[in-house]
Image (spheres, coloured by chain):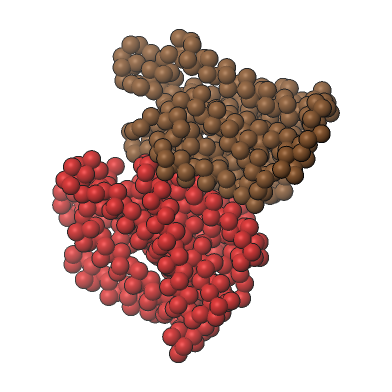
Chain colours: A brown, B red
């Protein structure tokens, strides 16, 4: 078959797929961050830790209760989301009247605690989570080999992102959410329970992070630092996309994952930093972000 | 200001006598972090900008000065200056990018940029990856004073620390510092008064980065080591913690916070991840119930006892 600038197509498409998977995680995580930020005005630093928690809950369910991947895919986000709701009720709620930076600092502290607890319990080495039997193996697409599980991750992420977008843009509930983002006082005056909406939004955003964690468990090692490494990149993704639009953060997530994958093929030395470089360039050209509204 | 007239000579005497009572290496480590925290506080406390990536300047300056002292054979004072200047240049570029956004975005941008520096340090050959730059010679100060002796090294570190603190105090107390505070309280208003606020923010950022670099370069000389720990985002978080615990926007708060955090690290060093958990716990407690920090609370108590009216327009 053809070769592209000396790169065999197998390697090229393989890395692009890997990039797309990373992009799927960036998209789901930055979607959750954007949702939470929109309503709570808090940048949820715990997001990475909650992603890690999702992976660990799935791993614990499998190893101690024998609960399989499919149930974990539902249970882990619910469990971690409920934990998130607890955090919002007990702590985050007390900070809404203060400078937004305090929310960042609080969630950073919580992230340190969660990461520390899991490092105490499981050390820094990772645990492996088996790919569910139905999704093992893969298809030869002619130009590349597609491992089934990886295709599944991209598919689920797309469905989740589109579903969230539809709910927010096209339903009554979504219109309340959008209104709450614009003017919570007015929405409250119309008889909608805004504090409960805020709590549930946080729980949903956290659940999304946990879902990404479960999806990631069979691909990456389940380890305490997996969240922190991820969240910083996701912050850059959020800066690039701007948090103004749901679709914007999803598209930016996938695009940057793909870009990262391509960089791994053509200039591997820069693959860790390429997203940060893009962030710097975007700041120069369009400081509000690609999909952001100028503040 | 009677407090200062009595307090400062006492503090100075304590600092001079301390190495005869306390292990000097601990003191030097604490002083390096104290300068780092003061530099950070210049930005958070006086301009209201939360940089979540100050480890980049601290850690990168450590690498540069360690390399300069070990490979190029520069004296400690030149290595220190070189580290500081590098951090200053880095701060100028990163600050120029980051001040395009404010608030939470500013924090995320500085964090992301510092992560870029981290990955650069992981890959660049001169940093020696996981090993770091080891066995950095402390050398002779100005070719005269042998710094391998911990006591002379301590006084050198103390002198640099005091110099750094004086620079910060000068900056904060000058008209420049007043403009910074105006930006913190109400940026649109400062702009409408005709101040080019971006330029002021950038100057403060660069100065803060430079002093963070001095602190990092000094730490590299003290421990004769520059490693990835100092460029990692954990270090960025630690400096935020020190400042928050001691008191944001107070002169001595970050110093107190740095000593406490370094002490916790030292006493719990063998307990592994517990250090992280405790640090996280302190963060949560500080944010929820203790936002003024230790020095801030003491000052507030003092103010109330003397029933002075509180200063108008708080920071938050």
Q: Quadrant of residue A126?
A: top right
Q: Is residue A11 left or right of residue A194?
A: right
Asked if residue A194 lies left or right of residue B129, the reply is left
Q: Position of residue A250 (x, y in %)?
A: 55, 27
Which residue is found at the position 67% from the left and 32% from the top?
A21
Tell which of A32 and B66 is nearer to you.
Answer: B66
Q: Position of residue A75 (x, y in %)?
A: 66, 24
A162 up-or-down from B295: above or below: above
**Viewer can see residue A190:** yes
Residue at coordinates 32% horizontally, 57% vertically from top-left?
B203
Q: Residue at x 34, y 72 (%)?
A: B162
- Residue A48 left/right relative to B104: right
Q: Quadrant of the C terminus of chain B?
A: top left
Image x and y of residue B256, in percent? 39, 61
Residue A217 seen by the camera = no
Looking at the image, is A35 positioned above or below residue B145? above
Q: Is residue A157 above or below residue B228?
A: above
Q: Indicate the position of residue A129 as horizontal and vertical percent values.
A: 76, 35
Residue drawn where x is 51% and y is 62% of the image: B60
The image quarter containing residue B204 is: bottom left
Q: In the image, B308: left or right of A292?
A: left
Looking at the rendering, in which quadrant would you find the N terminus of chain B?
bottom left
Total numbered circles: 0
């Amino acid at each position: 078959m053809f070769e592209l600038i000396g790169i065999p197509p197998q390697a090229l498409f393989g890395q692009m797929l890997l990039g797309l998977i990373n992009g799927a995680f960036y998209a789901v995580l930055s979607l959750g961050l954007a949702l939470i930020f929109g309503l709570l005005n808090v940048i949820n630093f715990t997001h990475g830790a909650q992603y890690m928690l999702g992976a660990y809950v799935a791993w614990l369910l499998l190893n101690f209760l024998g609960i399989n991947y499919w149930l974990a895919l539902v249970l882990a986000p619910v469990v971690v989301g409920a934990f998130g709701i607890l955090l919002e009720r007990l702590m985050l709620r007390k900070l809404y009247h203060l400078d937004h930076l305090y929310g960042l600092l609080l969630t950073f502290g919580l992230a340190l605690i969660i990461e520390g607890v899991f490092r105490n319990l499981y050390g820094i080495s990772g645990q492996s989570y088996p790919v569910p039997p139905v999704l093992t193996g893969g298809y030869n697409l002619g130009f590349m080999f597609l491992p089934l599980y990886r295709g599944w991750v991209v598919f689920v992420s797309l469905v989740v992102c589109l579903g969230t977008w539809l709910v927010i843009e096209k339903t009554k509930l979504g219109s309340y959410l959008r209104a709450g983002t614009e003017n919570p006082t007015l929405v409250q005056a119309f008889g909608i329970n805004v504090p409960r909406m805020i709590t549930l939004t946080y729980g949903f955003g956290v659940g999304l992070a946990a879902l990404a964690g479960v999806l990631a468990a069979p691909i990456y090692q389940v380890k305490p630092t997996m969240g922190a490494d991820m969240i910083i990149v996701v912050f850059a993704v959020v800066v690039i996309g701007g948090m103004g639009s749901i679709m914007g953060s999803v598209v930016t997530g996938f695009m940057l994952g793909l870009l990262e994958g391509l960089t791994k093929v053509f200039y591997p030395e820069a693959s860790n930093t390429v997203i940060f470089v893009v962030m710097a360039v975007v700041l120069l050209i369009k400081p509000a972000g690609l999909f952001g509204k100028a503040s | 200001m009677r407090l200062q007239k009595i307090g400062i000579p006492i503090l100075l005497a304590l600092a001079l006598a301390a190495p005869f009572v306390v292990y000097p290496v601990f003191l030097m480590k604490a002083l390096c972090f104290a300068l780092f925290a003061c530099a950070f506080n210049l930005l958070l406390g006086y301009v209201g900008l939360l940089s979540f990536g100050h480890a980049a300047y601290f850690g990168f300056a450590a690498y540069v000065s360690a390399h300069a002292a070990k490979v190029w054979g520069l004296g400690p004072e030149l290595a220190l200056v070189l580290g500081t200047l590098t951090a200053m240049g880095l701060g100028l570029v990163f600050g120029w990018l980051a001040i395009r956004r404010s608030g939470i975005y500013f924090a995320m941008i500085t964090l992301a940029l510092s992560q870029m520096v981290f990955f650069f340090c992981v890959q660049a050959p001169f940093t020696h990856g996981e090993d770091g730059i080891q066995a950095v010679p402390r050398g002779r100060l100005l070719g005269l004073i042998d710094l391998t002796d911990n006591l002379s090294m301590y006084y050198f570190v103390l002198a640099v620390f005091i110099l750094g603190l004086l620079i910060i105090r000068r900056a904060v107390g000058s008209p420049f510092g007043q403009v910074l505070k105006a930006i913190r309280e109400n940026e649109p208003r400062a702009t409408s008064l005709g101040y080019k606020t971006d330029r002021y923010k950038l100057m403060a950022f660069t100065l803060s980065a430079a002093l963070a670099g001095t602190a990092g370069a000094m730490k590299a000389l003290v421990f004769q080591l520059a490693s990835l720990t100092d460029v990692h985002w954990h270090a960025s978080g630690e400096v935020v913690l020190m400042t928050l615990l001691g008191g944001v926007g107070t002169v001595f708060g970050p110093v107190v916070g740095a000593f406490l955090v370094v002490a916790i690290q030292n006493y719990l060093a063998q307990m592994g991840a517990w250090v992280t958990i405790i640090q996280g716990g302190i963060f949560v407690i500080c944010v929820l119930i203790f936002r003024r920090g230790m020095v801030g609370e003491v000052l507030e108590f003092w103010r109330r006892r003397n029933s002075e009216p509180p200063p108008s327009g708080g920071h938050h």
